């Protein structure tokens, strides 16, 4: 493992406390707002938690993907492994925070059902973000090899790959 990849892993790990602070801050703000309006023990709070979880996960992975791409100069397979690990840890952290707070609402089975829905939604978001990152990696590799046909196959999945010369839309 290169020093570059060790640094990447450490840099991604160092983002986790900020993610935790962000999700905690947003969840606490929603709880305060809903408590003040008498809506704390309601489905509205669960829906707000879902929105927070989705937004935090998406933005965290997007920022980490951008950093990873810029730092590595591409999409190295080892970098993708670090990014997958980071995304999984963010999702676990977000789910733990919203699950703990949602359980305190005493909404019973409604809470459990909603949390399963959120977990599935976050799984899809995480997988899509990682697929997008990997597709860009594959496209970059196809461009480097000058494989126009492979590049066009990839562009069917995602736009932005126009010629072997490296032009992108």
Image: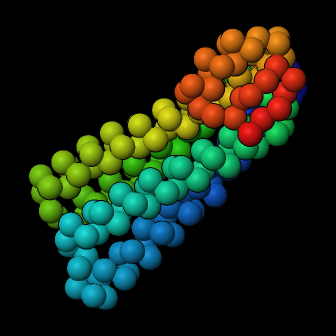
Residue 49 seen from this side:
yes
Residue sitting farthest toward the bottom: 36
Residue 100, by quadrant, is bottom left
The image quadrant where one finds the C terminus is: top right
Instruction: From the viewer's perspective, tell me whether residue 26 is left or right of residue 82.
Output: left
Give residue 25's position: percent from left, percent from top: 51, 69
Give residue 2's position: percent from left, percent from top: 85, 21
Instruction: From the viewer's perspective, tell me whether residue 159 is left or right of residue 69.
Output: left
Give residue 91's position: percent from left, percent from top: 47, 43
The residue under the point 60% across, 44% down is: 61
- Relative to the observer, which residue lies in front, 146 or 61? 146
Give residue 129's position: percent from left, percent from top: 55, 37
Question: Is 29 rendered above or below residue 147?
Answer: below
The image quadrant where one finds the N terminus is: top right
The residue under the point 40% across, 60% down is: 51
Residue 84 seen from this side:
no
Question: Is 153 rendered above or below residue 132?
Answer: above
Colour scheme? rainbow
The residue under the point 22% across, 85% down is: 38
- Relative to the observer, which residue lies in front, 56 or 36? 56
Residue sitting farthest toward the left: 109
């Amino acid at each position: 493992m290169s020093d570059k990849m060790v640094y990447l892993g450490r840099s991604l790990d160092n983002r986790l406390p900020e993610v935790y602070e962000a999700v905690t801050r947003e969840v606490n703000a929603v709880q305060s707002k809903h408590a003040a309006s008498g809506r704390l023990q309601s489905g509205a709070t669960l829906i707000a938690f879902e929105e927070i979880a989705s937004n935090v996960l998406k933005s965290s992975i997007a920022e980490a993907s951008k950093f990873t791409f810029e730092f590595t100069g591409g999409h190295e397979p080892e970098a993708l492994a670090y990014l997958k690990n980071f995304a999984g840890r963010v999702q676990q952290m977000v789910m733990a925070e919203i699950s703990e707070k949602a359980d305190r609402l005493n909404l019973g089975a409604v809470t459990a059902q909603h949390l399963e829905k959120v977990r599935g939604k976050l799984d899809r978001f995480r997988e899509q973000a990682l697929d997008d990152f990997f597709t860009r990696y594959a496209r970059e590799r196809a461009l480097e090899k000058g494989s126009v046909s492979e590049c066009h196959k990839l562009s069917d999945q995602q736009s932005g790959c126009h010629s072997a010369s490296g032009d992108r839309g």
